[in-house]
Structure formats: structure tokens, C-alpha cells
Image: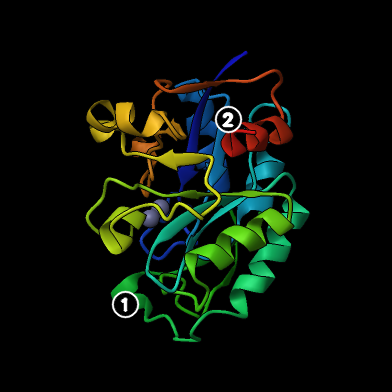
Amino acid sequence: MKLYYDLHIHSALSPCGDKDMTPNNIVNMSIIKGLDIIAVADHNSCGNVRAVMQVAGDRLLVIPAMEVETSEEVHMVCYFPCIEACEEMDVFIKEHMSGVKNQAEIFGEQLYMDSEDNIIGKEENLLVTATDLDIFQVSEKTREFGGVAVPAHIDRSSYSVLSNLGFIPPELVVGTVEITAKNRAKMEKEYEKKYNVISNSDAHYLEDIAEPEFYINIMSKSAEKVIEYLCKR
Ligand SMILES: [Zn+2]
Ligand SMILES: [Zn+2]
């Protein structure tokens, strides 16, 4: 079945994410847009994913995720088959962060929300920092939890595997790469030979959530099948 997706959306937990990126707003906007599958992937955290999944219920498939920053300052979007695995990864990631405190007036607030969009807490440590885990460790740990790590926005001039390492290390286990929609046409031919290519919004504002433009073709609408697709097994 053809399923339209946006697998890289930030919530208000990301300091750069708009305050309106609440669980209900994200889910409702995604449904209005006509998407079938989304993932909320905040920087180094999945603290709002459970609330987003509660809001979505059966109306929208939400893949548990987070966007991890490696020690090389490469962004990897890590996807998991269930929220429990994702939250275990979250605990692991927190042990590998610098402990630098957020300065909300400079970077923005990092808000935890419940399924009714109430603010239930604020993250004190700055989430947009590099962990001390390299790209291989992030990929391997994600796989240990049954998930898959996807190099994010590889076409960008910062925080990407190509900008920071110059190439995708051949020994890195990669099934899928993310290419920004605007650069997809010119890059996908080269990368499609080896990987699945996905394009997501990386939305920090509601209006930027993707239109139903890109889809994946999988047997059934489940997190397991999406993970399987991203692994390109
Ligand atoms: Zn990123
Ligand atoms: Zn992002």
C-alpha cells in the first residue's frame, strides 16, 4: 500500500521548534494534510512522542523517533518499532550528552507536553548539542533497540554526514538516507542505487509539515513495516 509520510517533524521540545508544535496541532495538521505516517523527531529526545501517539490513536501512524547528534555533529534520525524502545534510547542518549544547560532566552524553550497540550515540564539541558557517541555507535545502539538510524538531510551544508565526513562510510549500516525535497531530484539517482531515499519536512513550524507528496510502498501500515523498509532488508 502507498502511504504518504513525513518522518521528521520537530515539536515544542526542540528549542528551535515553535510553541505551536503541540501534540494535537501536529497530529491534526498531519491529518488535514492527508498524511498516513509521521514521526516526531526532536533533538536528542523523544520526550513528547508518547503524547503525540496518544493523540493520534488509530487516526495516524506515529513512528517513535528522535534526531540524535553524533560526536561528529552529524544528525541521524533514529526510528523505533515501539515507544518503549525509543524511550530506552532516550535514557542512553541522555547519559552521553554534555550537560550544558539551556539558555531559553537565546535558544528557545524546550517544552514537555501531555496529550491535551498542557505544558508538563521543561527540559533544562540544552538538547541541540553533540553527544559523545560517534555515528557508528548511534547506528549500532539504535539497531540494538530494534530500530534504524537514517542519516538526516545529507544534502545540507551542516550537521550532515556528507558535510562533516565527506562521504557515507561504507562500513556504516545504512538502508535509507534523507534528502531535502528541493534537492531530491538532482541527488536521488546517485543514492537510489544503494539506499532508499526519503524526503521529510524537518518542520519546526506547523505550516511546514509536508504535503502528501512522498510515499512509501509497504505491505501494511505498521511501525514494524516502516522500520523494515528503512532498513532496506
Ligand atoms: Zn537536523
Ligand atoms: Zn531536524
Name the one closer to the observer, 128 or 207. 128
For marks 1 and 2 on the same chain, the one whose residue lies earlier in the sequence? 2
Q: Is residue 207 above or below residue 51?
A: above
Badge 1 density bin: few <14, some 14–19, many ≥20, Cα 10 Å: few
Residue 132 point in image, percent of width and height: 50, 79
Residue 47 visible from this viewpoint: no
Name the one closer to the observer, 85 or 120. 85
Quadrant showing the C terminus:
top right
Residue 49 point in image, percent of width and height: 63, 52
| Residue depicted at 46% across the width and 44% down the height | 8
The residue at which mark 1 appears reads as 105
Specify the label residue 214 is tagged with. none
- In the rendered view, does 10 fall on the left or right side of 146? left
The residue at which mark 2 appears reads as 37
Residue 26 visible from this viewpoint: yes
Q: Is residue 230 above or below residue 111?
A: above
- In the rendered view, does 176 fall on the left or right side of 229? left
Badge 2 density bin: few <14, some 14–19, many ≥20, Cα 10 Å: many
What element does badge 1 sit on?
Answer: helix
Which kind of residue does numbered mark 2 sit on? Ile
